[in-house]
Image: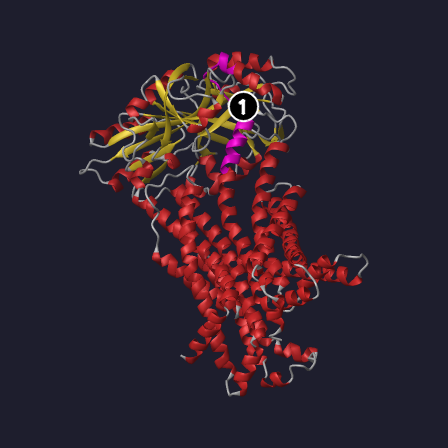
Amino acid sequence: MTALKIAWREARASRFKFFFVVMGVAVGVGALTGVRGFSAAFAALLRKEARTMLAGDVAVRQLFPAMPQQQKVLDDVEKQGVLVTEIVETVSMMSSKSVETPVLVSVKAVDPARYPFYGKVTFEPDMSIQEALAPDSLAISDDLVLRLNVSPGETVKLGAQEFKVSAITRTEPDRMTGSLNVGPRILISRAGLEKTGLIVFGSRASNRFLFKLPPQGVDVVALRKRLTGVFRQAQVVDYRETHPAITRALDRSTTFLSLVSLIALIVGALGVATSIHSHLQQRLDSIAIMKCLGGRSWQIIRIYTLETALLGLTGGVMGVAVGAGVQRLFPLLIAKYFQFAGEVSWSPAFALEGILTGLLVSLLFTLPPLLSIRQIRPALIFRREMAEVKPRWSVRLRRSGPAVLSGLIICSGLAGLAGWLAESAEMGVIFVLGLIGALLLLALIAFILLRVVRWFVRTRLWRMPVTLRQGLMNLYRPGNHAGSVLVALGVGVMFTLSIYLVQKSLLKEVINTAPPGMPNVFLINITESNRDGVLKLLEAQPNLKKKPRINAMVSARILTVNGHALNPDEFKGHNRRLTMDRQVTWADEKPDDVQVRKGAWWAKDAKEKVVSVSEDAADVLKVEVGQFIEWQVGGAKFQSQVVAIHRNTAAGMGGNSDFYFSHEALAKYPAQYFAGVRIPAAEVARFQRDAYAKFPTVTVINAADVLSIVQEVVDQVALVVRFISAFAILAGAIILASTVAGTRLRRVREAAVLKTLGARRARLVGIFSVEFLVLGGVAGLMGGLLAALFARALLTRLLDAPFRFDPLPQAVSIALTALVAVGAGWLASVRILGQKPLEVLREE
């Protein structure tokens, strides 16, 4: 009890200094509890609103219409009282009278009489879905209002039909369980979609079937089992589980963001450790006196351990409040894709979890300074004025045992925490090893840079103003912990800037490094009736780099390979694509972007049913030249002999087909066609207008539109990651404020002496500002360099993309970090300038 009283009194006496320590812990705990609390609340919301998220009790999604046997099952379940409705999702072109160039849109067609079974679609102006989706009208997303310059009441053209814009769609209950969830969207009735002429046999569309069970008579388990048996290649989910794609993404993002939040907490714990170390240095006399009066080292360690625990506990409690704010902000960050009804609930379990984590990490990082109490001797108060004798290296090595042990305990504790957060012991070890490597590298760079600054000042090769010289020398004042500040700020900058660099490099790679001649405009949903007309239009385009080619697409599925039935369970990951219905094509003449590796291509007028298989597919299927593959197209079956193994050398749509057939093999089956062409960027808009005017049901996809959709998604993800990563920068800034507060007495005395010697307030402001600017600038430089190295390693080793150094983000990071450091430094030292010199000197 006595130890607790002493700890409480010391903490209360140093409350200004420890305020920033507590805030550092609070920032880390807040990020951690906010992420995990939101994740748990979101998962609970998904479970609670599962029917609303699906818009039904059961949902089935596949990339083609219902086959005859599937339609029979749908008819049977409807006879049992189950309500069924179909949703068709595809892409097409839309134009308005105000904007000449058509826009690529995501089309969602529903039956207004039944959709949705649960939840509600809301519109602006407010109206029912039956009113909004009449056969001659449709609803648009708000971004189309700007892109097409239309508003409710005006007319747009979709496919070959004109429609009235009835409203702007605000919310859809099943927005995230659909196939096309980004980009400009329209909502239309199934009857309206049929008028457009967009959906014919072979059209690229996703079909989703929603089921609503009657109150009695049909069991969801039995229904799902029956549907799974007939919809073998479809995704079948029901209201008892959350949507697998959303749940998987939520789990992965929670793990990643939790580890980033742990880094922010670790940075805050570094602040606790440096503050406790600084505090112990100022309390050496008190500790020595306590030992002279009979106090044992373990008793004194207990006092300061309790003091640390009080700080960690207080920071944890404050962090819970910060976490509540973070959790409230998350819905705003992802509001584009999720609409939350009411407030997201707060879980007390995660609050307790965050408090305990903050306490544990704080205690772990203060082990070294606490154990150093054992080295303090009572004779210290009698030898205060004597020069310290540096012990021999052997003595220092012997005394380093506790520090090494502390390091092992800290690493083990962090590995355990990371493994617990990631639910993987292996991930915990990898996290700690990576963190140790980053911290050691940051510490080494900080040491070198500080040495360079000291050499720069001491050599006096250049005459420096007093303000600059004094500010630089302040980096080495006792208790300043400049190295810790640089490491803490550098970690935050490194993580935040790394995300930005990877994001921008990937998008630049997609935009700038496409192979020469790669198509930048794609045409899909070309039917047999307009195939020749589209080809003539393509050939008439000026400045084409390559002769356009239209490829046929037939949906086919492999049944047997050389007489052996294909077992989908034997294929994993990406290879499972070979067991599903897939688009195949024919080519009488060998395409220029195909290299024959084995066998030989067939003659142009070949009458045999032959096929060439890509190297990758042949390796997975274990097929060789001369063997046979049996296929199913619709309800028909046929065999083809493998006569060649090829390698694709082209990139982009149509340049990576796994199977090329002779025309004879696929001639009798209905086909859709697609084309890809390279058109000068300045001519793309004109071509879109011409193509849409002549062939309104053909969808023209401009690569720039696709990239804008990709960038929209990447930006949304990066925004969330940068939001959490910024907590590490904030924790680093708080550590800087903490070290300034810890050296307050020395700074007050320095300011008093300088004022006595004639220094004005402006001079003192300049000295302190130089110190903070250098700390922030160096931290920004360190973090930026490491971010570039980290982004380069990630891009070249894992993502197989080149890295290009961009000096602008580096310069911005240095400038912003310097500003953050100045702000944090002055927040902690603003009261210093107000001290009167006489008041300070009288205490000497």
Q: Which residue is mark 1?
A: 522
Q: Quadrant of residue 593?
A: top right
Pick the front one: 559 or 183: 183
Residue 626 seen in render: no
- Magenta stretch bounds: 691-713
Place of residue 145 in the rendered image (x, y in percent of width and height, measured from the top left): 44, 24
| Residue nearer the viewer, 631 or 406 | 406
Quarter of the image holding residue 80?
A: top left
| Quarter that holds the C terminus | bottom right
Q: Is any part of residue 683 visible from this angle?
A: yes
Residue 335 appears left or right of 782: left
Q: Nearer the viewer, residue 502 or 312?
A: 312
For residue 445, which quarter of the picture?
Answer: bottom right
Inspect the image, locate mark 1, and give the three-letter code of the amino acid beneath it. Answer: Phe
Task: Determine whether 422 is above or below 311 in the image.
Answer: above
- Where residue 245 sits: x, y (%)? 41, 41
179 lies above or below 373: above
In the rendered image, residue 708 lying in the magenta stretch gets the answer yes
Q: Position of residue 425 (x, y in %)?
A: 48, 59
Q: Where, quadrant-wise, is the N terminus in this rendering? A: bottom left
